């Protein structure tokens, strides 16, 4: 008896006990089967809010695994003539060869010239299966391989640049071709042959986490347009920090900034000079008898790729490091407040979604 002929309750009971990877494969058998699965698994699929295209290894040319928080859905790989047991399935109007990867997971295979069209077809099918409300994120560490721009797709990139890096053209091309929303960008930068361009997508990522071994901090402090920046660097001049704060206060830049943390390498420079900075940025002070509010907010979702893990150990926490400070500055255009904390070689800047009156009212 065909599964499609079973009573609805029986179908639902069967599908409820199948992995998403099996449901994905079964949904490709026919349009009728796809609709039955969507209807019976509506509540289950509704719990999926994010699907990942994982491509973290430097030599992987496609997402090795498409997964969500509870498991794997499908793998994508280049066609291998030595493999057997291929079977064709219609995916969003094009025939794609599949083969088993293991007892639970299947691999969608492509020839080199079909790479982009195969990924696009699978993405369209996932959108149809799970719904347009699902967000997709692409994680990568190989800047030489471009990924097609797809609906509801954002990016999360980890890149390690070798000493005396000279391939800035291709790196900028990779960044510019990344998904429209670059969720996070982590980069370990030694020495490059030229600086990033002023309109580089580096400065547009919602979150950047940079380990800088060359004087690129001033560019970040002038050009960054995102929400959260975490910087480790060789040096950071007092004048650069003063200019950054004053530009934020005047509304000339950093409109969307929520949090900035700069950590100067211990071996590279002395402690950040507190008094010259505070005297130059017009800070306001909270009465020392009062306990100031603590600034902390959720980090933009990030994922450390295995390539970067070999070189840099980042302390990943769900929230930004707390800032509890008696000094703050106020932005002229909207009266928003930012707390400033300088401790040793660490400079922290946290923007509140509050006016000065609301901010001070938190201590009453």
Image: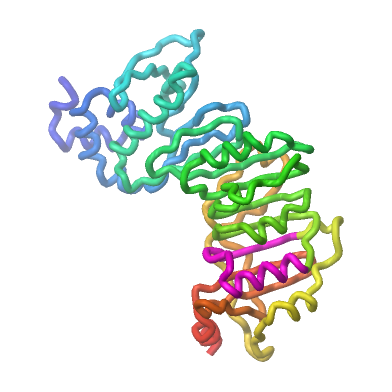
Q: Is the residue 316 above or below the residue 19 in the image?
A: below
In the rendering, at what x and y percent does residue 64 appear?
Answer: 51, 29
Question: Which residue occupies 66% across, 54% down?
Answer: 315
Task: Specify how the rendered protein is coloured.
Answer: rainbow
Is 363 or 12 nearer to us in this picture? 363
Q: Please provide percent x and percent y for residue 71.
A: 44, 37
Q: Which residue is drawn at 29% across and 21% down?
A: 90
Tell me if I can see residue 263 in this picture: yes
Q: What stretch is highlighted in magenta?
A: 239-263
Whether the magenta-drawn stretch holds residue 136 is answered as no
Taking the image as shown, residue 276 lies to the left or right of residue 183, namely right
Q: In which quarter of the image is residue 114?
A: top left
Q: Left or right of 73: which side holds 222? A: right
| Location of residue 159 in the rendering, given as x and y in whole percent from the top left corner | 64, 40
Quadrant position of residue 175? top right
Tell how many labels: 0
Q: Which residue is drawn at 56% across and 49% down?
A: 184
Q: Quadrant of residue 207?
A: bottom right
Residue beneath the point at 46% across and 40% down: 52
Q: Can residue 102 be seen in this view?
A: no
Depth check, front residue: 105 or 129: 129
Most foreground residue, 355 or 360:
355
Q: Position of residue 259 (x, y in %)?
A: 59, 64
| Quadrant that contains the N terminus | top left
Would residue 240 be counted in the magenta stretch? Answer: yes
Q: In this view, does 32 lie above or below 9?
A: above
């Amino acid at each position: 008896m065909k599964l499609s002929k079973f009573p609805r309750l029986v179908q639902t009971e069967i599908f409820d006990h199948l992995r998403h990877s099996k449901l994905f494969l079964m949904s490709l058998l026919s349009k009728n089967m796809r609709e039955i699965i969507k209807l019976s698994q509506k509540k289950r699929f509704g719990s999926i809010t994010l699907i990942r295209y994982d491509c973290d290894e430097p030599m992987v040319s496609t997402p090795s695994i498409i997964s969500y928080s509870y498991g794997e859905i499908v793998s994508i790989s280049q066609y291998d003539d030595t493999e057997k047991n291929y079977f064709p399935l219609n995916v969003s109007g094009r025939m794609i060869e599949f083969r088993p990867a293991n007892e639970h997971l299947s691999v969608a295979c492509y020839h080199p010239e079909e790479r982009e069209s195969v990924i696009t077809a699978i993405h369209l099918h996932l959108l149809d299966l799970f719904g347009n409300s699902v967000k997709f994120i692409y994680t990568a560490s190989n800047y030489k391989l471009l990924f097609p721009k797809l609906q509801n797709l954002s990016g999360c990139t980890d890149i390690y640049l070798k000493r005396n890096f000279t391939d800035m053209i291709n790196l900028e091309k990779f960044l510019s071709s990344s998904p429209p929303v670059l969720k996070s960008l982590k980069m370990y930068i030694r020495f490059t042959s030229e600086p990033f361009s002023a309109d580089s997508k580096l400065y547009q990522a919602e979150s950047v986490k940079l380990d800088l071994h060359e004087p690129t901090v001033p560019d970040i402090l002038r050009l960054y347009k995102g929400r959260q920046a975490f910087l480790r660097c060789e040096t950071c001049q007092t004048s650069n920090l003063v200019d950054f704060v004053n530009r934020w206060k005047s509304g000339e830049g950093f409109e969307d900034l929520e949090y900035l943390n700069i950590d100067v390498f211990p071996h590279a420079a002395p402690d950040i000079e507190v008094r010259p900075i505070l005297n130059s940025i017009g800070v306001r002070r909270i009465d020392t008898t009062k306990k100031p509010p603590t600034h902390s907010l959720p980090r933009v979702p990030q994922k450390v790729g295995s390539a970067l893990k070999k070189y840099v150990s980042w302390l990943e926490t769900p929230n930004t490091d707390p800032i509890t400070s008696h000094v703050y500055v106020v932005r002229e255009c909207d009266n928003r407040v930012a707390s400033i904390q300088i401790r040793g070689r660490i400079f922290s800047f946290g923007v509140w979604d509050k006016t000065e009156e609301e901010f001070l009212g938190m201590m009453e």
